[in-house]
Image (tube, rainbow, N blue to C red):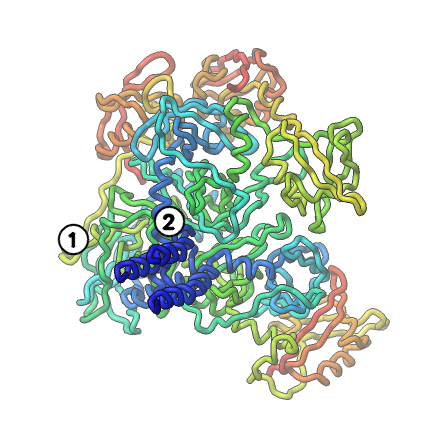
Amino acid sequence: MPRVTLLLVSLALLSPAVAEDRKRGHTEVFKKAGPAIVGINSQRGRNGWFGTGTIIHKDGYILTSTTVVPPGVSKIVVTTADGKHHTAKLLGASVDKEASLIQIEGNDWAHVDMGTSAGVEPGQVTYTMGNVLNSITQDNEVSMSFGIVSGRYEITEAMEGASYKGEVIETSAAVNPGVDGGPLLDADGKVIGILSLSYSRVRWLGVAVPIDVIRPYVQGLAPEAFGAPPARTNQGSGPGYLGVVAADEEDPGTGIPVTEVNQGSPADRAGIAKGDRILEVDGKAVHSAKELEKMIRAMKSGQQVRLKLKTESGPADMTITLDREPL
Amino acid sequence: MNRVWMASLVILLSSIPARADDPVAAARGVEAAVERIVDKVVPAFVFIGGGSGVCISEDGWFVTNFHVVNSPQGIIKRWRVKTPDGNSWLAEVVGTDTRGDIALVKMKEAKDRPHVDLGDSDLMETGEYVIAVGNPFLLGRPDCRPTVSLGIVSANHRCEGSFDSPKNLQGYLDCIQTDAAVNPGNSGGPLFNMKGELVGINGSISPRFGNRVNTGIGYAIPSNQIKRFIPTLKEGKGNMHGVVDGLTMLPKESAGDGATVGRVKPGSDAEKAGFEKDDLIVEVQGMPTPTLARWWGVVWTWPAGETLAFKVKRGDKTIDVSAKLSPLDEEEKAKQKPYLGLRMETSEDGGIVVQGVSPESPAAKAGVQSGDVIKSIDGKEVKDAGALLKVVGEHKTGDKIKLKVTREGKEIEVEVTLEARK
Amino acid sequence: MHSKLIALAVLAALPAWAEEASPDALAVQRAYAEVFKKVSPAIVSLDIDLEAREKPKSRAQRLQDMMTPAALREYYKRPEGPVSGVIVGKDGYILTTYYAVDGTVHGIQVHLADGRTLDGKLLGRDQALDLALVKVDAKGLPTLEPADVSKVRVGEFVMIVGRSPDPERANMTAGIVSADGRNSNTAIQTDAEIDYGNIGGALVDLDGRIVGIAAQLSTQEYGLNSGVGFVTRWDCVERTLPDLKAGKVVTRPPSPFLGVQAAEGALEVEGAQIDQVLPDSAAEKAGLRSGDVIREFQGEKIKEWEDLSKLIHLCKPGDEVKLVVRRGDTDIEIEAVLGERK
């Protein structure tokens, strides 16, 4: 009889293990992560962009790329996998990192977590998911492709409207227009990168900006949700620097015009252009160039400032991280 | 007792699939399953022209894409096709769904042919493995070895076509998107699930870099659609897609809750069925239709003549409506259109150069030759092929038209009696 | 009592039998990652200082180039940079592709996985198999175990490991064996992605054994990463290695070319119907026309297109050939001088 017991006990022990194994197939990863993938359409004046985003927090924070939500867009519509539309607000857009963070209303959203890109090596299973050729916005279908991490290397020339230059994670999973801004997921359904339409002229395969590059930026924008970003070594307690030259006008009723934008400055990276008018800084109306300068210098480098502008394609709200004054 | 104990242990342990601590064995498990399906389904493959097909019955009925059997000169009806066992067969195209891009072909004098069953394409889940068998770049031609590729279902019920107006319905309005490698030459070929059932016919790709090779997006016509059209295809009738006569849908951007009725024509089938303006159609034949694309997708997969069940939201009520699909107009008209049977190119110095003449076509019977330069039709000068075809289109089958052509320096007049495409 | 035990065991095992292979994503990836670790030490990167051989372009090709958008021309042009190679002999023998050395080689630098850079000397090469052998001065280099290529099955899981553009980091793509017996039985076809970054690299199985060398990349025909790619079979490689070590250079003889495109479909009259005669070709010069049906080639009857194709391939460029062609209602004799396939 003990032999029978042994057999029955081993049966009982083995079955859950077998069942667990079966839960980690591709269809299971899709069931887990699919609800967190959204389609995004954004507009600025007469220009429009479309692509994918990933809900990375139950409070509706959505991570996407600047090729889907560029800096200074006025209208962002998110289509969730159930087909419903939601208006989103832009929390920040970093052209350097090709990453944008937006947010929709609600606090109970299905989401996936950011993983780490540090130890990611070729051979690892990976998935791309998103709004491929409008699969979400037109057909209500999150599109998925399965591949492996196929390499890691430096991209020195950004292609196809992308802007990120640096180390990328390459994947053999399909990357096509509309999936940019979407996630590169690992076998656990965690985000290890954000997809870009850039590519290497040697490989011509899909690439993603590693999540470790983007995470500090996201944390900086929403520390209450994602934890504080690691201390940045190039931040001191110096006064803030925006990088615009503004002019005074006789009638300052409609803000002040920008006459020059310094190349590579926070303003430049955020997309502020010559001719734009700065109306408000952190909710306070600006009346003169000197006032603007005083306001910015009163802040610290690394601090975020909310600007209200009037651009040639309409009003724009921007959240910009100030730098240190370049020497 | 010992032997029984050992036997049951052996049975138990040998059947548990490899667990996570032996990754290569786990991968080999999937690999073995793929190899088994390949052995089972490849014999049903058909090499036809510049594409692929798959045999679905013992006596040699097979399916391919309409565009594989079509040509600029019209549908090619009789084919010599090959199978992986090295045999060649005369085959005849019996029925074509030109808009749905499916052709049903019959191998002559075929029996006991390896074939596959049509599975339920609606059950295909995103992430499921699928296997494509085809003849990309005609690599399989010399020795009858087709190409096999493995991928997953990227999305089901995708709409790859256009539906901006009922007059302009084209493409695959309901299809399976896959990342299995499919390339030119895979057209008309099968997409299988891991049970070896036919779940789609590969027909188009959406390449990323502007050349015609796969970059991870392939579209397959779903087996459920094909199943429903087979009876009409066997009868040899032309296109059979349909619409609800008199029903105009609003092309507005959907809020994800349904497809809105824009207009109901008085006295039409739609009105008689009970549709009303502003109705929100949420389900068709039991399938949810949250967007206009999905509405067209579901309607598209049913042949004209079928009565479909619709679920409609009107105010705070939910109503059931049923309506019959009437055939799309255009197809009927297209069948009587006269044709010439020429492949033409517009030359630099104005003039239409004949590149090819279809055998037994009206042009061939009239003696038009390749190399001829067409200068005028019925006395009207024509500068490009489009203009010429427009004039032909204004004629009826049976009409005689006069072409003035230049042949080796001399001007000749050729009289062509127009016929309809067969 | 015993039968109840057996029944219990069978019942417990039933779900395993009944269910299709459901991929355990985590296990599969560990398999790939293990293969990667095992294989990448034998994969090298080569910097070849090459003066590429001038290949004159035909008028048709130059016209096509002009019509290709700039971005696509980049796609078709080999980029600058290192190519991948595989260590095939622990005493410093490395295989890469013939294409990578097609011309005048002024120097080769080989980057090994262990970080060393060594000078490479070009030995033999074979154009048909697209292989070139390079020798470095080293001993005890890691090599790969050979797979039994005769046992390769369609559907088998395979991976390609290369080492470009970053010589310090190997890359990998994965797929299945799509077909065997390609290119006169010298190649295996795979849907694992092949591009400039892994051409010359190794195709291996789940045990990390080498099945072939990724070769014969033809971007104009099959594109990059299209899922249609070829590897030169390892058994062909093994047979050729002694010649390559001895420095033998085998160029592919030019292929004969008539210049006609096949019309599709079954015919009333048996033969190979011409759909198009290509400009500047032997067929055009001989007076063949679209619609002609070739019924005899050098006295041999032609039943279908494949027959004509096989017979043409037995000839050489420059051969004078006699054809019997049906045009309209009559059979006519046409003589052609075969050209060369570019």
Q: In which quarter of the image is the N terminus of chain C?
A: bottom left
The residue sitting at 32% across, 40% down in the picture is C342
Label 2 sits on what residue type?
Val
Residue B148 in percent (x, y) is at: 37, 44
Q: Mark 1 points at which residue?
A: C248
Closer-to-camera residue (C119/B181): B181
Looking at the image, residue B74 sits to the left or right of residue C196; the answer is right
Closer-to-camera residue (A88/B4): B4
Query: SS class of the residue under badge 1?
Result: loop
The residue sitting at 18% across, 54% down in the picture is C238
Label 1 sits on what residue type?
Lys
Q: Can residue B202 be seen in this view?
A: no
Distance between the alpha carbons at the discs numbered 1 and 2 = 41 Å
Judge whether B265 appears above or below A18 on screen: above
Q: Residue B34 carries which label?
A: 2
Judge whether A300 appears above or below C6 on screen: below
Judge whether B99 appears above or below A271 on screen: above
Residue B286 in percent (x, y) is at: 64, 42
